[in-house]
Image (cartoon, rainbow, N blue to C red):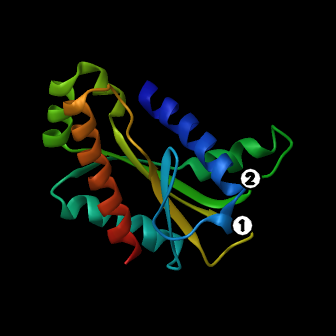
C-alpha cells in the first residue's frame, strides 16, 4: 500500500507542474523527465484506451488510482481548488523488461511499477493529457538499454491510446 501513496504523491506533483503549462504541450512530446500527449476523446475513453493498450501488449493492469478524486476531496481542507476535472494513473509492469532492468542493476527496482497517467484541466474540457514519467535508474550500458526499452513500451502505449 505504501507504493500507492508514493505514486499518488509523485503523480500529484507531476500534475501540478504540467497543469500550469498546458498551452505549451503538443501531442507526443518529451518534456525532460516526462512524456506528454493529448487526446480530444472523452476522459473515460482515454483511460479505457490506455488500459486496452496495456492489455493488448499481454500485460496486466495492476492498479488504477483516482488522483483527481483525491485532489477534489482535499481541496476544501487546503482552501484551494483543483485545476483538474479528472485525473487517474495506471500501474502495470512487464516481467520481461523488468527482469532485464534488474539483471542490469538491482538499483533499477526504482522503476517499478510503471505508471501512465491521464488528466483533464477544467479550463480545457476538450483536451485530455496523457503520459508517463520517464524511467530513471542505474547507469551503465545494460541499464540504460533496459530503461530505454521500458520507455519505448510506455511511449507506445500512450501513443496507441491517442490514435
What residue occupies the far top of the structure in this picture?
Answer: 106
Q: How many marks?
A: 2
Residue plotted at (59% across, 74% down): 127
Question: Mark 2 and 1 residues: CB-CB less than 8 Å, in contact?
Answer: yes
In the rendered image, residue 98, in percent from the top left (x then y), is placed at 20, 36
> In percent of the image, x 70 and y 50: which residue is there?
72
Looking at the rendered structure, the secondary structure element under dot 2 is loop
Q: Can residue 29 be seen in this view?
A: yes
Against 127, residue 143 (above or below) is above
Q: How crowded is mark 1: few (under 14 residues within 10 Å), some or many (20 or more)?
A: some
Task: Report x, y in % for residue 109.
Answer: 30, 26
Residue 106: name its quadrant.
Answer: top left
Q: Does residue 155 appear left or right of residue 145 in this picture?
A: right
Q: Quadrant of residue 95?
A: top left
131 is higher (above) or lower (below) than 135: below
Q: Is residue 119 left or right of residue 62?
A: right
Look at mark 2 in the image and give the residue it sits on: 82
- Distance of label 2 from label 1 (alpha carbons): 9 Å
The answer to whether any part of residue 1 appears in the image is: no
Q: Which of 135 and 85 is in front in this view?
A: 135
User: As displayed, is residue 67 above or below residue 53?
Assistant: above
Is label 1 in a helix, a strand or a loop?
Answer: loop
Residue 147 place in picture, x, y as percent: 28, 39
Which residue is under mark 1?
A: 122
**Residue at 34 percent of width and 33 percent of height:** 111
- Residue lying at the far right in this picture: please name it: 79
What residue lies at 32% left-to-right and 49% top-to-bottom?
A: 151
Look at the image and tell me in which quarter the N terminus lies.
Answer: top left
Q: Looking at the image, is mark 2 or mark 1 earlier in the sequence?
A: 2
Amino acid at each position: 500500500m505504501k507504493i500507492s501513496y508514493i505514486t499518488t504523491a509523485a503523480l500529484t506533483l507531476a500534475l501540478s507542474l504540467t497543469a500550469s503549462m498546458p498551452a505549451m504541450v503538443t501531442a507526443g512530446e518529451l518534456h525532460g523527465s516526462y512524456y506528454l500527449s493529448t487526446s480530444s476523446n472523452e476522459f473515460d475513453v482515454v483511460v479505457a484506451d490506455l488500459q486496452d493498450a496495456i492489455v493488448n501488449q499481454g500485460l496486466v493492469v495492476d492498479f488504477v488510482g483516482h488522483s483527481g478524486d483525491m485532489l477534489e476531496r482535499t481541496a476544501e481542507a487546503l482552501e484551494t481548488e483543483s485545476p483538474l476535472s479528472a485525473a487517474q494513473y495506471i500501474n502495470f509492469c512487464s516481467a520481461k523488461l523488468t527482469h532485464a532492468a534488474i539483471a542490469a542493476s538491482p538499483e533499477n527496482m526504482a522503476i517499478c511499477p510503471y505508471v501512465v497517467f491521464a488528466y483533464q484541466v477544467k479550463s480545457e474540457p476538450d483536451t485530455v493529457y496523457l503520459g508517463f514519467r520517464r524511467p530513471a535508474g542505474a547507469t551503465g550500458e545494460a541499464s540504460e538499454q533496459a530503461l530505454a526499452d521500458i520507455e519505448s513500451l510506455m511511449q507506445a502505449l500512450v501513443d496507441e491510446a491517442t490514435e
